[in-house]
Amino acid sequence: MNICLLGATGRTGQHIMKFVLQDMHHLTVLVREREKLQQEHEKLRVLEGNVLHAEDIIAAAAGADVVISTLGTDGEKVLSESMPHIIQAMNQHHISRIVTVGTAGILQARSAPAVYRFQSSESRRKSTVAAEDHLKAYEQLRDSGLNWTVVCPTHLIDGEATYEYRTEKDMLPDRGTKINVGDTAHFTYNQLFTEEFEQHRVGIAY
């Protein structure tokens, strides 16, 4: 499989890269600075660029069968401003499948299913800026016509994969309070090989 990964230098992206290369898939990553990626592999192709530039994403997606994005917001609307470029690149290259990592804030609230968690009492964050950017990117993806899955981890901690976690469509598993980057990466990567959560957000937690 040929995989395009956006966000490879982030915490979750680095773990996804390990899973992809362990299985000897071809991997193309788009990074802003090559020196931040301390990785060499015969199946790895590294391109320098910016996800806010459509031509860079188009170049990275060339030849890919699927796209994985673990991009974060950085408080600068990176997600919602890059998503149209990702959709454009996928359409241009006739790629239908994309798996992204979002936030539990854009899942439906268990206590009030008509609203998102970040809009409810379930959210502990005072600022909604990041969640709003995640939401806009999710809505763009939902309306894109692509075959998408958005993995929505709750409080994200460091750690290697334990391979033991709970998931739930469109909601956070009951009483879920945290999940580590290794398990988030493991679940995200494995969405490339299952149809179970296609066209869904998925909450993940311990």
Image (cartoon, rainbow, N blue to C red):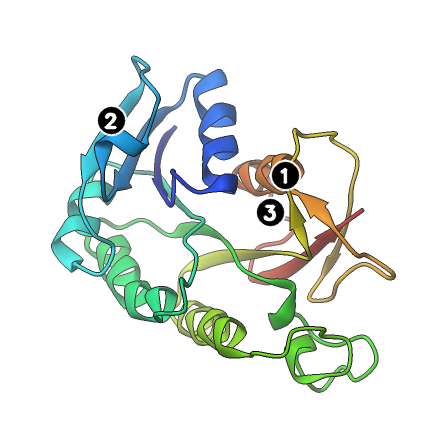
Which of the 4 image quarters holds residue 67? top left
Marks 1 & 2, CB-CB < 8 Å contact: no
Residue designated by label 2: 45
Q: Which comes before the other along the chain, label 3 or label 2?
A: 2
* Rendered position, 11 above or below 205: above
Mark 3 surroundings: few (<14), some (14-19) or many (≥20) residues within 10 A? few
Q: In the image as oriented, which residue stretches furthest toward the front? A: 126
Determine whether the residue tagged by mark 2 lies in a helix, strand or loop. Answer: strand
Mark 2 surroundings: few (<14), some (14-19) or many (≥20) residues within 10 A? some
Q: Which mark is residue 17?
A: none
Determine whether the residue tagged by mark 3 lies in a helix, strand or loop. Answer: loop
Q: Is residue 121 left or right of residue 100?
A: right
Q: Which mark is residue 158?
A: 1
- The residue depicted at 66 percent of the width and 33 percent of the height is 159
Distance CA(mark 1)–CA(mark 3): 28 Å
Mark 1 surroundings: few (<14), some (14-19) or many (≥20) residues within 10 A? few
Distance CA(mark 1)–CA(mark 2): 26 Å
Q: Position of residue 27 (x, y in %)?
A: 33, 29
Marks 3 & 2, CB-CB < 8 Å contact: no
Three-letter amino acid code at the position of disc 1: Asp
Three-letter amino acid code at the position of disc 2: Arg
Three-letter amino acid code at the position of disc 3: Glu
- The residue depicted at 75 percent of the width and 62 percent of the height is 172
Mark 3 or 2: in front is 2
Q: Which comes before the other along the chain, label 1 or label 3?
A: 1
Which of the 4 image quarters holds residue 51? bottom left
Residue designated by label 3: 195
Which of the 4 image quarters holds residue 140? bottom left
Q: Position of residue 74 (x, y in %)?
A: 40, 62
Mark 1 or 2: in front is 1
